[in-house]
Image: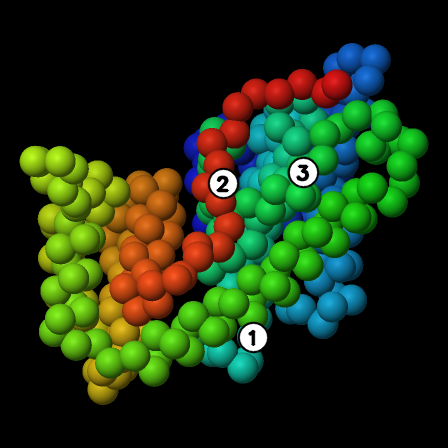
Amino acid sequence: MATICKGNKWFDENAIDTEFIRQHEVLTPMGSKHAPLSSALVLEKFREKAHNLGLVLRGEKGALRRDGLAFMYVADVEDNMHPDYALSIGFRQSSDQSLAFNGMCGTHVFVCENGVCTSIVKPSKMKHTIGNVVKNAGFLDSKIDAVFSRFAEDADAIHGQVELMKKTPLTDELLGKFVRLANGEWRGDRFVKNPLLGSSNLMHILEELENPTLNSHDDSSVFRLMNAVSYVTTHKMRNPNQSAMASRMMNNLIMGLIKPDFTPLGDVVDITEETAE
């Protein structure tokens, strides 16, 4: 699932139209080493790379800050082989030296106006410097390549995770472990509740598990639990940031219960201001 979180300081209605972006983005250098990167150009290259790989982007969402200095983009990747879930991809950047270009990919791609992203691809980071943008014509292409290469690698791993969930029976013992760990954890001699989920959302998950809104009532696998988690985090939680973080945490928790050597994919990064060097 792909999500953008932004306020009223952002254009969103036409923000996946490259001509609209070009008309409203601001590309004024803010220093001797600064070379602003056009978000319209990045989006064109992003789409071109997806097309060349045979990937179809659906549900595209974009947001261009009204001052023309920052842009966010996310989309789901169509996959007819796996119609019951989707993988997502995206990027964010600014042209005022505050945020470099960075791509994202995973089961839940989330980008917020404050710079917080989920499943960021660290090797794709590209600062808007003369050396990167002007002197190295292929540098942007290599960074976009890094995003799609990571997507291909993670997609194989995620498909494997989902297949494992579908093959694993949802036993009372496993569900009990999930409830205990999802609710919080013991730290020393005291119990610390999970601040991302909370008791009410945990109850919503159990209710959704008992009576699925969108998914099969006949599914007796762990995938039914993951679907319940996904529904609650996307339909019951009003805070998009909390929703993205909780969805990721619960996915990792479930996978850890059925595969002890499970290693989470991607990163959650809180971006701080940076300047071109």
Q: Secondary structure at mark 2?
A: strand
Front position among marks 3 and 2: 3
Residue behind mark 1: 79
Quadrant of the snapshot with the N terminus: bottom left
The vertical placement of 22 against 79, above or below, is: above
Which residue occupies the extreme top position in the image?
A: 31
Look at 66% across and 31% down and name the residue there.
Answer: 100
* Residue 217 quadrant: bottom left
Q: Are marks 3 and 2 in contact (CB under 8 Å)?
A: no
Q: Closer to the N terminus: mark 3 or mark 1?
A: 1
Look at 55% across and 80% down and name the residue there.
Answer: 80
The vertical placement of 93 against 14, above or below, is: above
Q: Is residue 171 left or right of residue 112?
A: left
- Residue count near mark 2 (Cα–Cα under 10 Å), binned few <14, some 14–19, many ≥20: many
Residue type indicated by callout 3: Lys
* Residue 169 quadrant: bottom left
Look at 52% across and 67% down and name the residue there.
Answer: 157
- Residue count near mark 3 (Cα–Cα under 10 Å), binned few <14, some 14–19, many ≥20: many
Q: Is residue 165 left or right of residue 147?
A: left
Q: Nearer the viewer, residue 172 or 229?
A: 172
Q: Secondary structure at mark 3?
A: strand
**Label placed on residue 51:** none
Estimate the spatial distance between the alpha carbons at disc 2 and disc 1, rounded to whole Å.
23 Å
* Viewer can see residue 234: no
Residue behind mark 3: 125
Give residue 191's position: percent from left, percent from top. 10, 39
Q: Closer to the N terminus: mark 3 or mark 2?
A: 2
Q: Is residue 236 left or right of residue 124?
A: left
* Viewer can see residue 223: yes
